[in-house]
């Protein structure tokens, strides 16, 4: 949750721009933020990477708990 909060803070504090709007739209659409966008918003790459790392850990944990390894 902290990683998501930090991502929201980065976006909230960045100046309004087409790039910021593209980043927000990517998040709304649940798609990856384009590399060009990550490079243009200060702090966005680190914040987004942190969220994605935590997301992968959560997915791995859920798969483990649900026994996904039994269905391969």
Image: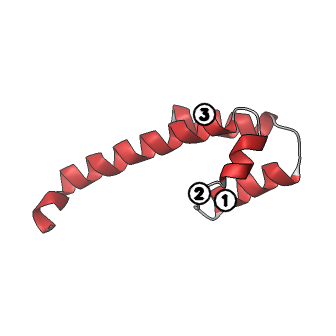
SS under mark 2 = loop
C-alpha distance separating marks 1 and 2: 6 Å
Q: Disc 3 vs disc 2: Cβ atoms closer than 8 Å?
A: no
| Snapshot quadrant of residue 32 | bottom right
Counting from the top left corner in percent of width and height, residue 65 is at 20, 50
Residue at 59% x, 41% y: name it: 48
Horizontal side of residue 10 vs 46, given as left or right? right
Q: Which residue is mark 1?
A: 26
Q: Disc 1 vs disc 2: Cβ atoms closer than 8 Å?
A: yes
Residue at 66% x, 50% y: name it: 35
Q: Is residue 53 above or below residue 22?
A: above
Residue at 20% x, 50% y: name it: 64
C-alpha distance separating marks 3 and 2: 14 Å
Sequence-first disc among 3 and 2: 2
| Snapshot quadrant of residue 68 | bottom left
Q: Where residue 32 is drawn, which disc sits there?
A: 2
Characterize the local packing of mark 1: few (<14), some (14-19) or many (20 or more) Cα atoms within 10 angstroms. Answer: some
Q: Which residue is mark 3?
A: 46
């Amino acid at each position: 949750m902290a990683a998501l909060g930090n991502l929201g803070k980065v976006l909230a504090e960045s100046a309004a721009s087409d790039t910021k709007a593209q980043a927000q739209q990517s998040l709304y659409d649940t798609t990856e933020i384009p590399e060009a966008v990550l490079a243009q918003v200060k702090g966005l790459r680190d914040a987004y990477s942190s969220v994605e790392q935590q997301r992968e850990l959560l997915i791995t944990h859920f798969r483990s708990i649900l026994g996904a390894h039994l269905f391969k």
